[in-house]
Image (spheres, grey):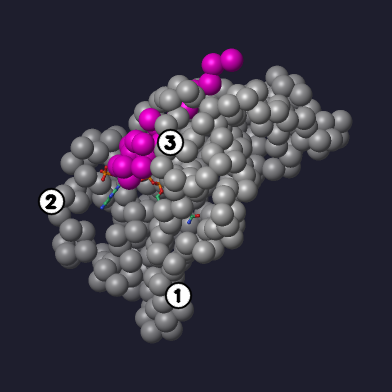
Amino acid sequence: MKAIVYKRYGPPDVLELMEVEKPTPKDNEVLIEIHATTVTSGDWRARSLNVPTGFGLISRLILGVSRPRQPILGTELAGEVESVGKDVRRFNIGDQVFAYSGAGMGCYAEYKCMPEDGSVALKPTNLTYDEAAALSFGGTKALHFFRKANLQKGEKVLVNGASGGVGTAAVQLAKHFGADVTGVCSTANVQLVESLDATHVIDYTKEDFTQNGETYDVIVDTVGTAPFSRSRGSLKEGGRLLLVSGGLPDMLRTPWVSMTSSKKVIHGVAPGRAEELDFLAKLAEAGEFRPVIGRRYPFEQIVEAHRYVDTGHKRGNVVMTLTT
Ligand SMILES: NC(=O)c1ccc[n+]([C@@H]2O[C@H](COP(=O)([O-])OP(=O)(O)OC[C@H]3O[C@@H](n4cnc5c(N)ncnc54)[C@H](OP(=O)(O)O)[C@@H]3O)[C@@H](O)[C@H]2O)c1
């Protein structure tokens, strides 16, 4: 089968399209023929090792010290079940599914095996394969953090980086949970964030949300530009800062914040669980959540797709389509 492989860390050019062996499902696995996958900020970080301050060594230990342990990137897919192992009960041949492989990666390929009790779910019938492929990365991250923050109906939420993969999902999920949502983005993305039904949109090129006197119950920082030192004054008493993207020094300060104030900083890795995929699929089916696709590329244009994501200014999600 065709796959996109990287054998060393570096710029987008390290990605090569090549033939590799097609996987065979184990007894508890499904083999999925992939119709669409995505290029996420996670793929960019794993390819380049450009990671937040303090995470260089940890990242190498996880991904491979001198070269990538898993040579096939890609954490999201949508496709069709081609065959199943003998113990599989949840899925049948021909089922249309989407999946999140997380740190196991391997979705930049024509086929991928997933355990049936892993993060695999039936594709919502009202979404295309392209949309379903983009359902889980941003969606599971935003959902994980809102649950950790115990987000309540009527609370005021600010999403910094509202136009990105995690941000577009966070705006939609916060609205679903009944929050009053403010999105922060650049001029070019104001309309997009308004279209997601954000109550207020702040253009960061014209206004600094930390200086406008407004306060929030929850601030979600998906960019890394709103650490506690900068956003503390914008948090209400009892407010929570969700550091989706943050450096190690900011994270190490979090116990001190809790000890010395009523405010809380929440950080960590969002795993992307099967139950979260089911939750997102139901929301999508009910018309309350729809992944934003900013750009599509054919599989063969992976280098161009990564170059775009490397800018740090992608809109929503970047999908790669496979034609078989
Ligand atoms: N904790 C976890 O488990 C976890 C999981 C996944 C991802 N992450 C991290 O979360 C971060 C966000 O991921 P993502 O996939 O959403 O990234 P992304 O899609 O690449 O984010 C790009 C967006 O960021 C916006 N942006 C850039 N600079 C900005 C600024 N100064 N202020 C406001 N918005 C700005 C851009 O909008 P403009 O073009 O308008 O500037 C663009 O739409 C990444 O750092 C990623 O590593 C963490």
Q: Amino acid at mark 2?
A: Lys
Mark in front: 1 vs 3: 3
Circles 3 and 2: CB atoms closer than 8 Å: no
Q: Which residue is mark 2?
A: 206
Q: Is residue 306 magenta?
A: yes
Q: Is residue 311 magenta?
A: yes
Quadrant in which residue 195 is drawn: top left
Of 217 and 121, nearer the camera is 121
Question: Alpha-carbon distance for marks 1 and 3?
Answer: 35 Å
Q: Amino acid at mark 3?
A: Asp
Magenta residues span 304-324
Q: Which residue is mark 3?
A: 13
Q: Amino acid at mark 1?
A: Leu
Question: Alpha-carbon distance for marks 3 and 2?
Answer: 36 Å
Rendered residue at 86%/31% (across/down): 86
Q: Position of residue 14 (x, y in %)?
A: 47, 38
